[in-house]
Image (tube, grey):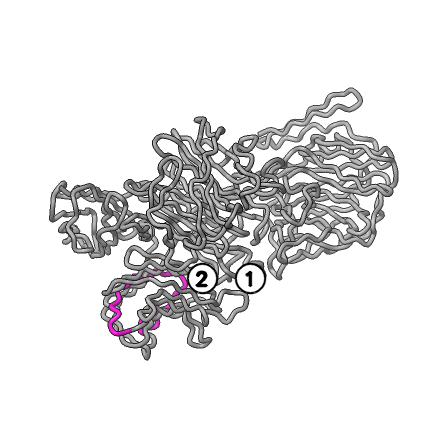
């Protein structure tokens, strides 16, 4: 790539170009005869510590944040200061004689996100200024500031006489690349200009006068001088990196600005969050669940499988772990287990989405992906469209909203979260809302596509409306989901208030969703997972990933530096009018070593039934006979010294699943409330699969039920124990697997590349009606095998757990499913994990 700058000086045309691959010096443009002097210069070349030095006055500046939190990265020359939105900027005072006529501020900036404009607190006309330099007296406005605003435009502010002048460019600074910015002010001629990468991008005129300063004003590097907060978080700090900031004693000539720009040819900065270092002592941060590297995430949306890769998007605030100025984050995976966080794909820009890019959905039509999203400005929400091409790392927005507003002006409470689906070759969009004509109730507006490019839509009325007194679905619906399982379809909504994911089965007739029952089902047996995003996986299994909120206070989020986590991928099937949820089979690849137990009898007097088993990242697989116990389950995150434990059990006296968090932590700011839901379990053994990942607990029961919760113990690697009350129970078979890998690739180290080779064992006889043999090869030692046989809908019908060795290379299946019935005619898939390699094969039942 070349840098090219064209300047006209007194009729002389100067062109300065240099290649980033060519270190040869650029010819020096004709200099202005007046020599510019740096009054302040910040080079940021300290290697560590919570202070930095201004090199002209040797003044020391403090870096905001907890001790040890200051971070440096490679800059345009030497080091640069990383600033993290709600912390990491520097403040201090330095003595100089400020110029009253001419001045310039310049520096290099590499934003990883644009700063926050507060949706409710900031007028739309007020710009945030995440400044590389700001020494403004917030009462008198004396001083000068240069930075970028909430839309990434270069912005400057200064005061001449009684006038406060603001100058704002129309051009957006590139994300995650180095850019040189400068503000030139000549108060004696009444002119000011902004420069980006050596080129003037904006100029303004004002009344001639004297530049006003406050010699005692604090200097901010990486934040504007104003105080702006949300929930205790500063919102007007820069997120990204800063280098080579200077305040000059005069306005620089165009040629001098080009010279400053051409001094360096930096490579793109490494702005990935060093998670391994930053969160090294964070015992509550999950390791194998998908989550953001830092900052805020909530609703997942747009799960896609395209070109052999999975993509999922989510609500993201890169500026801190709080809700505000939402972007669409982007994660990519080859296996739904290990993920890489990519640059955000959508962010607020002037227009209908200038305040936030809220939730939506993604589809693939004729091999082309499309994103539908909610764009928010101060007045209303509208529906936007974006498209992309391989490798789908950058997306192009449609210039205007494809649906500019709700179809009615008085009946809707809000209007957001499109979901697009196909029915009888036609494409439809449903959008969440709440109706206010008569009884307040949730609803879904329906639209029909009238163009193949999805830019034209025709309103079709409401597809579905709630009846809160009957169905308990609240007065607003968000994040809707539709899926056709074949004979039946489902519509899932997340109802408000008291957020909960609920669904109906039924059929869509082209204009209405006709429910089988007026009252919906809960997605999770205990309400914690919200806003699932769905898409078939590589084998056609309908896969869902939702959000599991932290439930902690803002102060705890500030301490963590991250907020919320995604669920593990789950496979959904529909049986007997209910969604059955099981862990995705690819999660078997996470399993490491195991501890095995059989026929462990336990009761209310038992302690340490699992022989000092401990962990922070593990999976439990257990078959438990409840015996005479009235409560049976597990004690997790157990610490006998502090009395902490989280109880997860089934209560036969109330027919309820229970999460008892009343003693889960001695820490403040974490959830301690109990959770329970009535559910009648059939008599017999209870099959549990429980995934614990630091503060996340996901539970699967009898290969059909699921729920999640959060627990924040004061220590890591706590005891794992069994729990019973009212009688004795028996753990017939119980395994605890150490979990390894997974999660999100860190900034300092990419995820280890896993082998994408899948073993395909030979099945014989095939097809057949009984006695299938699944034969492996190249087994040289005793090797455990874990897996499932799935029917054509993706529902697991037979669990496989066995041991193979060089003399025993075959898994046998007699064609009988785990429910005791014979497999019906059709195609089945056996899929699982052989040592650390995935395998699958097709089984045809005649």
In the image, 110: left or right of 837? right
* Residue name at image x 80 percent, y 31 percent: 32
In the image, 46: left or right of 341? right
* x and y, in percent, of residue 309 in the image: 39, 39
Q: Where are the magenta residues, as a range? A: 609-629
Badge 1 local density, few (<14 within 10 Å), some, or many (20+)?
Answer: some
Q: Quadrant of the N terminus?
A: top right
- Tell me if residue 94 comes above or below residue 253 in the rendering: below
What residue is pinned by disc 2?
Answer: 710
Distance Cα–Cα, label 1 vs label 2: 13 Å
* x and y, in percent, of residue 74 in the image: 59, 46
Q: Is residue 748 visible?
A: no
Kindly state the secondary structure of the residue where label 2 is placed: strand
Of residues 285 and 578, the one nearer the viewer is: 578
* Residue name at image x 11 percent, y 45 percent: 769
Q: Is residue 625 magenta?
A: yes
Residue 370: image tag: none
Of residues 9 and 698, the one nearer the viewer is: 698
What residue is pinned by disc 1?
Answer: 553
Mark 1 vs 2, N-terminal side = 1
Q: Quadrant of the C terminus?
A: top left
């Amino acid at each position: 790539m070349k840098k090219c700058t064209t300047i006209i000086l007194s009729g002389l045309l100067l062109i300065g170009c240099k290649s980033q691959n060519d270190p040869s010096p650029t010819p020096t443009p004709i200099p202005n005869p007046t020599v510019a002097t740096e009054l302040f210069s910040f080079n940021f070349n300290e290697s560590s510590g919570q202070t930095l030095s201004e090199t002209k006055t040797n003044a020391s500046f403090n870096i905001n944040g907890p001790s040890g939190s200051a971070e440096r990265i490679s800059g345009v020359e030497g080091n640069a200061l990383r600033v993290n939105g709600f912390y990491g900027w520097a403040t201090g005072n330095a003595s100089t004689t400020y110029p009253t006529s001419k001045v310039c501020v310049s520096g290099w900036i590499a934003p990883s996100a644009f700063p926050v404009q507060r949706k409710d607190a900031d007028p739309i006309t007020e710009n945030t200024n995440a400044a590389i330099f700001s020494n403004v007296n917030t009462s008198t406005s004396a001083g000068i500031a240069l930075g970028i605003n909430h839309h990434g435009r270069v912005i400057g502010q200064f005061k001449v006489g009684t006038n406060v002048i603001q100058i704002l460019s129309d051009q957006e600074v590139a994300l995650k690349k180095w850019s040189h910015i400068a503000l030139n002010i000549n108060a004696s001629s009444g002119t000011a200009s902004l420069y980006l990468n050596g080129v003037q991008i904006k100029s303004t005129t004002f009344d001639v006068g004297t530049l006003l300063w406050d010699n005692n004003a604090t200097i901010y590097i990486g934040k504007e001088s104003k105080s702006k907060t949300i929930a205790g978080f500063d919102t007007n700090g820069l997120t990204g990196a800063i280098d080579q900031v200077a305040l000059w004693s005069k306005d620089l000539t165009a040629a001098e600005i080009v010279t400053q720009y051409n001094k360096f040819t930096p490579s793109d900065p490494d702005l990935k969050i060093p998670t391994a270092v930053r969160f090294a002592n964070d015992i509550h941060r999950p390791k194998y669940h998908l989550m953001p590297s830092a900052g805020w995430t909530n609703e997942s949306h747009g799960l896609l499988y395209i070109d052999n890769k999975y993509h999922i998007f989510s609500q993201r605030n890169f500026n801190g772990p709080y809700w505000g100025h939402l972007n669409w984050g982007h994660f990519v995976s080859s296996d739904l287990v290990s993920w890489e966080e990519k640059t955000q794909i959508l962010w607020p820009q002037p227009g209908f989405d200038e305040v936030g890019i809220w939730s939506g959905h993604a589809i693939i039509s004729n091999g082309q992906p499309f994103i539908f999203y909610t764009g928010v400005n101060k007045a209303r929400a509208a529906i936007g469209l974006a498209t992309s091409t391989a490798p789908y790392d950058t997306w192009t927005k449609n210039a205007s909203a494809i649906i500019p507003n709700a179809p009615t002006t008085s009946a809707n409470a809000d209007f957001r979260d499109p979901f697009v689906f196909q029915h009888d070759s036609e494409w439809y969009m449903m959008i969440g809302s709440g109706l206010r004509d008569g009884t307040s109730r949730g609803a879904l507006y329906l639209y029909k596509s009238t163009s193949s490019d999805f830019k034209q839509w025709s309103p079709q009325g409401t597809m579905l409306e709630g009846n809160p007194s009957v169905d308990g679905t609240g007065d607003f619906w968000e994040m809707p989901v539709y899926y056709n399982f074949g004979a039946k379809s489902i519509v899932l909504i997340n109802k408000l208030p008291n957020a909960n994911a609920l669904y109906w089965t039924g059929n869509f007739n082209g204009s209405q969703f006709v429910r089988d029952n007026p009252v919906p089902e809960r997605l999770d047996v205990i309400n914690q997972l919200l806003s699932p995003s769905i898409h078939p996986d590589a084998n056609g299994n309908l896969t869902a990933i939702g959000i599991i909120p932290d439930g902690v206070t803002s102060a705890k989020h500030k301490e963590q530096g991250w907020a919320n986590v995604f669920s593990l991928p789950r496979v959904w099937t529909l049986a007997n009018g209910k969604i059955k949820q099981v862990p995705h089979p690819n999660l078997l690849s996470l399993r490491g070593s195991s501890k095995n137990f059989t026929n462990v009898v336990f009761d209310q007097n038992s302690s340490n039934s699992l022989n000092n088993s401990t962990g922070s990242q593990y999976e439990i697989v257990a078959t438990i006979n409840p015996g005479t116990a009235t409560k049976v389950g597990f004690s997790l995150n157990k610490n006998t010294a502090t009395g902490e434990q989280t109880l997860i059990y089934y209560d036969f006296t109330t027919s309820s699943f229970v999460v008892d968090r009343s003693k889960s932590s001695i820490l403040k700011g974490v959830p301690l409330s109990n959770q329970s839901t009535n559910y009648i379990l059939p008599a017999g053994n209870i099959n549990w699969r429980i995934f614990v990942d630091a503060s996340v607990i996901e539970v699967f029961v009898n290969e059909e039920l699921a729920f999640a919760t959060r627990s924040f113990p004061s220590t890591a690697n706590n005891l794992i124990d069994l729990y019973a009350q009212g009688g004795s129970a028996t753990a017939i078979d119980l395994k605890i697997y150490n979990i390894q890998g997974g999660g999100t690739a860190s900034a300092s180290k990419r995820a280890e590349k896993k082998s994408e080779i899948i073993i395909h064992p030979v099945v014989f006889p095939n097809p057949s009606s009984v006695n299938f043999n699944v034969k492996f090869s190249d087994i040289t030692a005793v090797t455990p095998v874990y897996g499932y046989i799935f029917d054509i809908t993706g529902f697991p019908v037979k669990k496989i757990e066995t041991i193979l060795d060089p003399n025993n290379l075959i898994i046998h299946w007699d064609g009988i499913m785990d429910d005791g019935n014979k497999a019906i005619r059709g195609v089945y898939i056996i899929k699982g994990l052989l040592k650390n390699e995935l395998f699958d094969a097709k089984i045809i039942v005649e």
